[in-house]
Amino acid sequence: MLISAQDVLKTVKPNQRCIDAAQAKSEITQNNGLVIDVREPAEHSQKSASGAINIPRGLLEFKLPELEKDADRPIYLHCAAGGRAIFAAEQLTRIGYTNVSVITCKAEVVCDTL
């Protein structure tokens, strides 16, 4: 029996730190956090948050360790609606990153806030 992505999200999301864009902005100015847009490049090129690095979710656990070797650096993930960012946060936690947050509001809000 297949399990829907929405059902998987229901089990994964409670284990992830989820915050809104305003809280993320406040924290990032204090902790030098890294903002990662896990949307596809075409989505990122249409509108993106200031300073966000685009690494699509499917490549994140391969590319991020090349860019950020500090497992404790604050990492803030966002996507269009939150689902991909939640799955990405789970994967980053599995490979050893300890300070991962998901920005839960829509990409337009993130782009306008950060």
Image (tube, rainbow, N blue to C red):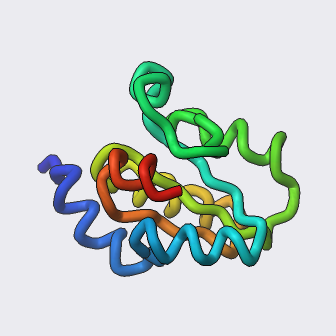
Image point (71%, 64%), residue name = 33
- Total count of labels: 0
Where residue 91 appears, x then y in whole percent?
55, 56
Return the residue nearer the eye: 102 or 33: 33
Residue 70 versus residue 41: which sits nearer the camera?
41
- Residue shown at the point (61%, 58%) measured from the top left: 92
In this rendering, the answer to whether 57 lies above or below 8 is above
Residue nearer the viewer, 87 or 108: 108
Left or right of 71? Residue 107 is left
In the rendered image, residue 59, in percent from the top left (x then y), is placed at: 59, 34
Farthest residue in the top direction?
42
Which residue is the extreme one toward the front? 112
Examine the image and state in which quarter residue 53 appears.
Answer: top right
Which quarter of the figure has residue 72? bottom right
* Residue found at the far right of this picture: 69
User: Which residue lies at the image location 41% right of the left edge and 60% below the top edge?
Assistant: 86
Quadrant assignment, res 10: bottom left
Q: Is residue 96 above or below residue 99?
A: above
43 lies left or right of 57: left
Please tell me which residue is depicted at 47% across the width and 30% down the height of the picture.
44
Q: Is residue 28 left or right of residue 19?
A: right
Residue 14 rendering spot, x and y as whole percentages:
35, 80
> What x and y, as percent, mark residue 51?
66, 45
